[in-house]
Structure formats: C-alpha cells, structure tokens
Amino acid sequence: MHKVLIHPATYQDCRQAVEAAFEAFPRPVRGLSILVKPNVLRGGVPEEAITTHPAVLRAVMECLLDLGATDITVGDNPGLMGYGANEACFEKCGLTEAALGHYKNIGLDAVEVPFSTLGDPGLMPNLSVSRAVLEADVLISLPKFKTHGLTVLTGALKNSYGILPGAQKAHLHKLSGSPQRFQEVIVDVFRLREPDFFVVDAVVGMQGNGPASTELRWIGKVLAADNPVALDGVIARMMGLDPALLRMLTYAQDCGLGDFSDAALKVQGQLTAIPDFKLPPLDGGAIQLFQPVQDLLDKSLVKRPKADPERCTGCGTCVAQCPAQALALVATATGAIAVVDAELCIGCFCCQEMCPEKAITLAAPSPSGGCPCSGGK
C-alpha cells in the first residue's frame, strides 16, 4: 500500500504542509548527507510557476535543519546550458536565497554510469550523473505540478531527468524518436538513483502548453509521498486523467517502481479532479491509444514549434539550445523571429521549454505538409 499526502497550502503557510509531509514520511536525517533537488527548468521569476516555488524549498530546508540535518546540498541541472547558467537560473528563481546557504552547482562534478533501456539497450551505453546525486544518503525531490507536451505531466518521475548535467538531456530527447519512447527513457533515467522522498509544489500549478505555459491554475496544495508511481498517479487523477493511459506510468509500474492502482493507494487528504483542467496539446502523443489511432497521430498530428510574433524578441535562446540545429532567426520588419525547419525538427520541444518569453507554441503541420511557422514553405 502506497501513501500519498494531499495537504492544503498557500505560499504564505506552506511550512505547515511540509511539516505534515515529514511527519507522514519520517526518516533519519541527522548525520547524513542530503541532496534536495527542486525543479529548475530554467530561470524564471516565482510568479511564472515554471519552477519549484522558493517558499516550498525554504520550508523543506527549515524542516531539515530543525530535524538536525547539517550536511545539506540544494542543486539541479537546468535545461539552459552555458557558463554560469546554473547559478543564474537559481538566482532568478529565488531558490539561491531559499536554499539558506546550501546551494551548489551540482553540474560541475559528474560520474559516468552504465545506462540501458528495455526498448533499446544501445541508445546511450553510458550517461553522466551529478556526483552529488549518486553519493547522497538521502535524495529529496521537489517536483512542480505541471503539464508537459511529451509526458503529459511533470511530477516525481520526470523531475529526476535533472540529475543529468550538460547536453545529455537534449541528446536523449533526440535519440528517443517518439513521445512513447521518451516516456520509457524518463523512467530509465529515474532508476539510476531513485529519490527517497517527494514534496510537490502544487500551490500554483500549470496547465495547457507545459512545462513553460502562460496558463497557470490555483490548486492550493502540497503533495508528498515516498513512492513515485503512486504520486504521479494521484497527479494524473487530479488533472482528470486515468494514469493507466500514460506510458511513463505503466512502464514504471512494469519496472517494479510502484503501483498507481486504487487498490494500492492510500490518500491522506482529499483527492478530487480539478474541474476543466487543460491537458497539453500533445497529450495524444504520450497517451496509449489503439495503434490505428496512434498511427494517425504520428502521420497527421505531429506538432512543430511556432514562434508567436507578439511575444518573440529574437533573443536566440531557442536557436542556441536546439539539439538538432533546426531553428534559425529570420529578419522581419521589426527585428527577428525564430523559424523552425520542419525537416530537421525532432519534436523534443527544448525550444519551448527554454524560451524566456514563452513565445513558442506547438502547431500541427499545414494541410500542404509545410512548416506551420513559415507559411507552409
């Protein structure tokens, strides 16, 4: 039986919810090395709700210190790459201050480990994982309640993708080749070092075109668990989705990582679906469907990035972060706009995740088969 805590919270009083989480899932911390890993997709102010809110991180840190923990590291590997990017992301998100002096750039020291996946053992034979992740006695994961175009939701399983520093995350996106395959890769990366405890920032969540959407949703909860599959199953139900439809969860369950079924779940708190919660535009690509329907999606509903001219500033972040080099800046009468080459695009949507202006949306190809962001050319 897996227990999941759902506790009411605001960012002003979330300390109470976090205390309840530590009480519901007690574990020794005194004298142990502890790594706290928030979700730091990229730099963004807390009000954007694309990262774990600093109030939740601060509450976790205060609880750990009150419990006698002394050897604590706070770190993550944001998607944005480049010199100083890690520090800049944490600072902008307000997480450096919330770490209470325990922030560290964990991407500077990594260990190479064997990596294999059930579907393709040779996908990438080895991966580098931040040493702090592998050597921590206790790993605490702080996911954000969000949607995601390739995985439908970002939760306990997906948050562990950040244990990989550098360009590996984008490279695995590229090699995966399909949303279904990427689901399995997420789980296999998670298995390299399973966290011991999860605290989810679900005070203000994200719906629609996640994980960097402008559509925010007040939820007013903090979730906690010590099992990732049960926790993500609860998040799916809160989003109004049957968890059995998500390949990421069925694959994790098949791997023995937990059980999302009602029979295996004990909820402490009130579990209710959020009314009219918007799933991401690519939910079809990540949901398990009958093969004929999936084939139709693969052929005619494959989305491609499109820059919104009203929001795009031509900063070039998407161009720099694209692992397939499928984006370029094209001059316009008012400056420049990012344009995708549909033939080169691999559909990983790193551009959408990294865009600081949230200018990248996802669009289906035009009926003529051309690029949706270049007038069908």
Image (cartoon, rainbow, N blue to C red):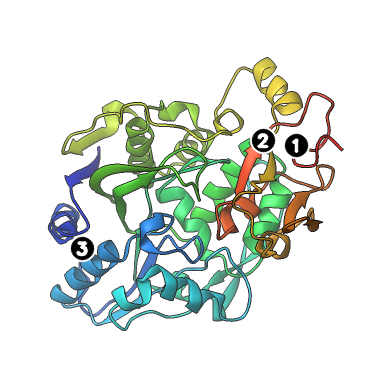
User: 342 above or below 35?
Assistant: above
Q: Check disc 2 and give the amino acid type.
A: Ala
N-term mark: 1 or 2? 2
| Disc 1 + disc 2, Cβ < 8 Å | yes
Residue 298 x/y as whole percent: 72, 28
Per the image, label 3 sits on a secondary structure element best described as loop
- Of badges 3 and 2, the one in the foreground is 2
Q: Dot 2: what SS?
A: strand
Residue at the spot of label 2: 363
Numbered tag placed on residue 172 in the rendering: none
- In this rendered view, identify the residue nearer to me: 219 or 267: 219
**Amino acid at circle 1:** Pro
Left or right of 282 in this view: 44 = left
Total marks drawn?
3
Residue 173 left/right relative to 156: right
Whether 188 is drawn above or below 276: the answer is below
Residue 27 marker? 3
Q: Quadrant of the C terminus?
A: top right
Q: Can residue 314 be seen in this snapshot? A: yes
Question: Which image quadrant is residue 327 in?
Answer: bottom right
**Callout 1: 10 Å neighbours few (<14), some, many (20+)?**
many
Residue 122 visible in the shown view: no
Q: Nearer the viewer, mark 3 or mark 1?
A: 1
- Determine the residue positioned at 48% across, 37% down: 208
> Which labelled disc corresponds to residue 372?
1
- Front residue of 196 and 42: 42
- Circle 3: residue type: Arg
